[in-house]
């Protein structure tokens, strides 16, 4: 998955320091990232130090900073290209940096009194200098669900909207006041009409493309497995055997890993 960058280690501790010559610079414009013309990322020693730099995180001993590179000779790429970028740790850094860039962009003013927010010096937060309110990076809990029937088939879907139109699994956000397990049961029923049981937690994944923390679960549907699709969410739902082709794009996502685990017989 995109966050599996070993042997590199991701350090998200908020420990700002002055940039070093080989540290990386990340710059974004909307949903695009700015790169050098050769599709590589800028280093600190390649630009003027007179601009503003915002510390983001470290990978190993190399720090990443947010800055404005629109005055440089750059190319602009949709940020989703990062899911297949090599080396992988830079793709992960790029999309994680975009998540923080969007958070900074969306929290410039206090929602209580409208005061211009400032960046806190002790933790990764935006602080209102008037009322003291702190805003932390947004993380949305959500589920990815591998539903398996009595014939050992997996339910795959295709979204009704959005750019991703390959096979997916049931997915949805947690609502106020419910556990993640309740989210699995509710989302599956809402989108397919199926009542599921035998929930088993698989693993989680940070998914910066939507500021989400994904929780992967397998579950079972016994007996009647006819589908009643929620057309606003899904345009297709199919039961697939293990030996059938299921094209889920690449290996960046929890969805792809769960489909692969099913095909390898590891969800029985």
Image (spheres, rainbow, N blue to C red):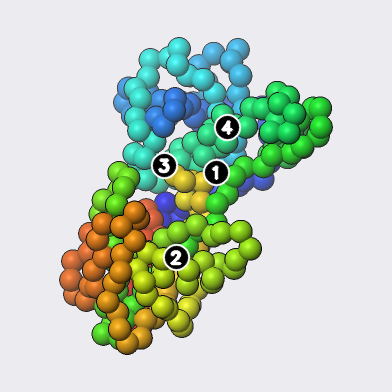
Decide which of tag 3 and tag 2 comes sooner along the chain.
3
Q: Which of marks 1 and 2 is in front?
A: 2
Q: Can see residue 2? A: yes
> Which numbered dot is residue 129?
none
Farthest right residue in view: 131
Q: Dot 2 lies on which element?
A: helix
Q: Is residue 64 left or right of residue 229?
A: right
Q: In this view, does 235 lie above or below 40?
A: below
Decide which of tag 4 and tag 3 comes sooner along the chain.
3
Q: How many marks?
A: 4
| Residue beneath disc 3 | 91
Farthest left residue in view: 244
| Residue beneath disc 4 | 106
Decide which of tag 1 and tag 3 comes sooner along the chain.
1
Q: Nearer the viewer, mark 4 or mark 2?
A: 2
Q: In this view, does 103 lie to the left or right of 157?
A: right
| C-alpha separation, residue under disc 4 versus residue under disc 3 | 23 Å
| C-alpha separation, residue under disc 1 versus residue under disc 3 | 12 Å
> Which numbered dot is residue 59?
1
Tell me whether circle 1 and circle 2 mark residues in contact (CB < 8 Å).
no
Where residue 117 appears, as percent x and y from the top left, is 70, 27
| Residue beneath disc 2 | 187
Q: Nearer the viewer, mark 1 or mark 3?
A: 3
């Amino acid at each position: 998955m995109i966050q599996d960058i070993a042997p590199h280690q991701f350090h998200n501790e908020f420990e700002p320091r002055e940039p070093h010559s080989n540290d990386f610079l990340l710059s974004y414009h909307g949903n695009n990232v700015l790169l050098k013309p050769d599709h590589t990322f800028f280093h600190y020693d390649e630009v003027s130090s007179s601009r503003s730099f915002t510390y983001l995180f470290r990978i190993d001993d190399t720090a990443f900073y947010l800055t404005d590179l629109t005055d440089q000779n750059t190319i602009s790429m949709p940020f989703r290209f990062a899911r297949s970028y090599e080396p992988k740790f830079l793709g992960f850094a790029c999309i994680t940096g975009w998540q923080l860039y969007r958070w900074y962009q969306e929290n410039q003013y206090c929602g209580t009194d409208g005061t211009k927010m400032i960046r806190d010096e002790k933790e990764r937060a935006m602080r209102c200098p008037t009322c003291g309110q702190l805003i932390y990076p947004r993380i949305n809990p959500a589920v990815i669900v591998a539903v398996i029937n009595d014939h050992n088939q997996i339910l795959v879907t295709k979204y009704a909207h959005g750019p991703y139109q390959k096979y997916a699994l049931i997915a949805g956000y947690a609502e106020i006041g419910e556990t993640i397990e309740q989210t699995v049961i509710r989302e599956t029923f809402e989108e397919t009409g199926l009542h599921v049981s035998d929930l088993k937690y698989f693993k989680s994944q940070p998914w910066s493309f939507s500021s989400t923390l994904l929780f992967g679960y397998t579950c079972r549907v016994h007996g009647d497995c006819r589908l009643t699709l929620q057309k606003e969410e899904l345009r297709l739902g199919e039961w697939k055997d293990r030996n059938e082709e299921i094209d889920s794009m690449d290996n960046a996502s929890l969805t792809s890993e769960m489909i692969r685990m099913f095909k390898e017989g590891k969800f029985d």
